[in-house]
Amino acid sequence: MFEKYLFTIAALALILTTGCRGSAPHLEQNSIDDELVDRSISQRSVLTSEQLNTEYGSILDTMMRKLPGFRADTRFSCPAISLRGRPNTVPGVTEPLVYVNGVQAIDTCILSHLSSSDIARVEIYPRGFTTRPGYANSPYGLILLFMRDR
């Protein structure tokens, strides 16, 4: 009986430490269809490669400087993020979904670890809905990151 629980705990720990869960189609920078994105939702924010070229620090720092409705509380191990201006009262539960090149990140910590200079484009959907294929809806919002080709 104890071995069954030990195996379950070990499997759960392995899943939690991988950093990402699920998958969605990989979107190359050249394949971003702005017309599709523009039709997907009227309320969204975009940081383009031109805007990110001159930025320094993590993408989280850049988003806090550049996006007026973006709030992040960094007192926790992973930033507690709010996209609609309200404070996030339940870190880890009421977080927006974060995707990096179409792969869902396990939490918001990835935003603290990625450099702005490595990101080609950021799309923020406060309402949590996009018509881009392969992305789940979220009542707490969506953050889509597209990495630069190196």
Image (cartoon, rainbow, N blue to C red):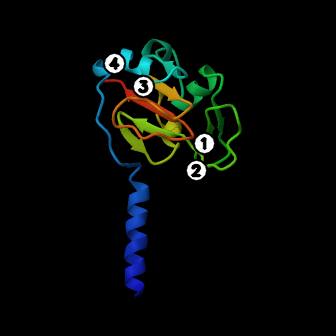
Q: Nearer the viewer, mark 1 or mark 4?
A: 4
Report which residue position mark 1 lands on: 79
Report the disc number at residue 92: 2
Report which residue position mark 3 lands on: 119
What whole-number distance in Å separates the C-alpha atoms at marks 1 and 2? 9 Å
What whole-number distance in Å separates the C-alpha atoms at marks 1 and 4? 30 Å
Give the mark nearest the N terminus, 4 or 3.
4
Give the mark nearest the N terminus, 1 or 4.
4
The front one of 55 and 144 is 144
Relative horizontal placement of residue 102, taking residue 46 as reference (left or right): left
Q: Toward which corner of the image does residue 12 lie, by quadrant?
A: bottom left
Report which residue position mark 4 lands on: 33
Give the mark nearest the N terminus, 1 or 3.
1
Q: Residue at the spot x=43%, y=71% of the render?
A: 9
What kind of element bears circle 1?
loop
Camera sees residue 13: yes
What whole-number distance in Å separates the C-alpha atoms at marks 1 and 3? 19 Å
Q: Nearer the viewer, mark 3 or mark 2?
A: 2
The residue carrying pointer 2 sits among few (fewer than 14), some (14 to 19) or many (20 or more) residues within 10 Å by Cα, namely some
